[in-house]
């Protein structure tokens, strides 16, 4: 039993000592049984939120309306959620109503897939009401209950299915898969941010080719932002052996195969409600992909992109091609400078020496020097930079 659970045991014990039930549930139980690293430890309990709060000194109402209270303990935070049922789902996403219940069974029933519907007690005993352990052994994603109903209730579950298939290298059980095919259009009802998060996780999975293939096979891709017109390109990507480790890589791979300009990338990623920092990295990484793959890369391209984006581009190209592009990371590390601040001259110095006045020309000169040093046309020493400045000014006149 992993240390994350060990540390949380006193919390389970305290809830139980007060006469309630408490279990580990959800992804952390699944991942422990699969010998995968776990991130957040979720606890489910028969105690109502007010009862949970009365047992612990430090709690935060992180999702009190859904029955979730965060317990702060020795610098860790644990989400403790009251057993609940859900009903309504008028909008194919959020339930209209959650009801707190005292029965673990009711709580496990509302969960999406059998492998996510396992509970583990304080003693390590597993409650498995829907055959989750057998599905885990057989590497199968299977909806709890009737898949059609479950996807009708919450269309995000379809994205979660292909995401888990990709992350865990599992197959989707036939009826569950048929349910997704039948309800794929409901994905359009889901908030883009939530589809986004599942899509990125799916593309970073160990079996992302399978995940993307499932997105195509089920037609889910048609109901994701802006992917509907790119079937041929998506199929090419499915047949490439990509292996991605961060979000900018995910979008850069698509942008590369879609042959997107910087502007097209911006428009596309805005539709996906992507963070601006990510958009900028994607633009830089995609530009590197085009230049590296056509052998047109300059020092200046490497410098402008920054080390992380150089690594992103190399990771992608190494995965999808038979050549080794790793040398570009070494090239980056051998750049004369990697930041403007490393120039051995400053604007202040040029003014003090009476070479230039504070003026727009000063900025232009520094930009010129930066590029000249990066491209190894001028050495990064004070005498070389001063003499380059003087000839630059004279040229200008
Ligand atoms: P991850 O490793 O990405 O955190 P997870 O399975 O823990 O995967 P969470 O979103 O953290 O996913 O949800 C925790 C648990 O809550 C799930 O394991 C599942 O039992 C339940 N759950 C989450 N989302 C849904 C949903 N849309 N429908 C039904 N049950 C869900
Ligand atoms: Mg989780």
Image (cartoon, rainbow, N blue to C red):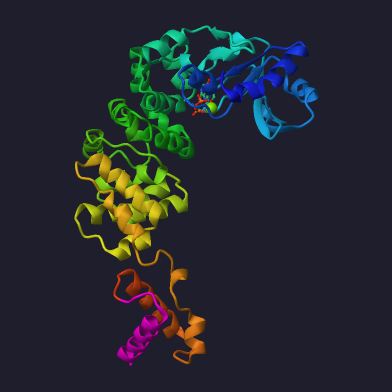
102 inside magenta stretch? no
Give above or below for 163 relative to 312.
Answer: above
Image position, residue 329 (x, y; %): 32, 53
Q: Is residue 64 left or right of residue 381?
A: right
Which quarter of the rendering shows the N terminus? top right
Asked if residue 186 can be seen in this view, the reply is: yes
Give above or below for 129 relative to 317.
Answer: above
395 inside magenta stretch? yes
Give above or below for 46 relative to 185.
Answer: above
Give above or below for 317 relative to 332.
Answer: above
- For image coordinates 45% across by 18% down, the residue present is 34
153 or 312: nearer the viewer: 312
**Span shown in magenta:** 378-397
Image position, residue 61 (x, y; %): 71, 32
- For image coordinates 34% across by 53% down, the residue present is 310
Asked if residue 258 can be seen in this view, the reply is: no
Image position, residue 93 (x, y; %): 51, 28
195 or 87: nearer the viewer: 195
The answer to which quarter of the image holds residue 159 is: top left
- For image coordinates 34% across by 63% down, the residue present is 335
Q: Main secondary structure of the magenta part?
A: helix
């Amino acid at each position: 039993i992993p240390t994350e659970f060990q540390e949380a045991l006193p919390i389970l014990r305290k809830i139980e000592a007060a006469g309630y039930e408490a279990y580990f549930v959800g992804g952390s139980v699944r991942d422990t049984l699969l010998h995968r690293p776990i991130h957040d430890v979720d606890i489910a309990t028969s105690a109502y939120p007010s009862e949970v709060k009365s047992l612990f000194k430090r709690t935060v109402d992180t999702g009190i309306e859904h029955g979730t209270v965060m317990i702060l303990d020795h610098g860790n935070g644990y989400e403790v959620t009251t057993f609940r049922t859900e009903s309504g789902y008028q909008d194919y996403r959020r339930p209209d109503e959650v009801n707190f219940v005292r029965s673990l069974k009711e709580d496990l029933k509302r969960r999406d897939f059998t492998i996510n519907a396992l509970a583990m007690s304080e003693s390590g005993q597993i409650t498995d009401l829907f055959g989750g352990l057998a599905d885990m052994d057989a590497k199968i994603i299977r909806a709890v209950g009737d898949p059609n109903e479950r996807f009708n209730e919450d269309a995000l579950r379809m994205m979660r299915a292909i995401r888990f298939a990709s992350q865990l290298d599992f197959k989707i059980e036939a009826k569950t898969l048929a349910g997704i095919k039948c309800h794929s259009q409901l994905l359009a009802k889901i908030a883009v941010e939530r589809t986004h998060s599942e899509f990125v996780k799916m593309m970073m999975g160990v079996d992302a080719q399978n995940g993307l293939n499932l997105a195509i096979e089920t037609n889910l891709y048609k109901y994701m932002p802006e992917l509907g017109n790119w079937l041929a390109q998506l199929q090419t990507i499915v047949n490439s052996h990509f292996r991605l480790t961060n979000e900018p890589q995910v979008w850069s791979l698509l942008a590369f195969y879609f042959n997107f300009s910087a502007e097209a990338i911006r428009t596309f990623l805005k539709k996906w409600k992507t963070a601006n920092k990510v958009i900028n990295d994607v633009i830089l990484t995609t530009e590197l992909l085009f230049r590296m793959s056509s052998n047109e890369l300059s020092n200046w391209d490497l410098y402008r992109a920054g080390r992380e984006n150089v690594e992103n581009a190399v990771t992608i190209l190494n995965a999808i091609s038979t050549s080794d592009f790793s040398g570009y990371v070494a090239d980056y590390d051998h750049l004369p400078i990697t930041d403007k601040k490393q120039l051995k001259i400053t604007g202040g110095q040029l003014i003090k020496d009476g070479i230039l006045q504070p003026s727009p020309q000063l900025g232009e000169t520094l930009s010129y020097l930066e590029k000249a040093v990066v491209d190894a046309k001028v050495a990064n020493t004070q005498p070389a930079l001063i003499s380059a400045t003087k000839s630059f000014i004279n040229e200008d006149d």
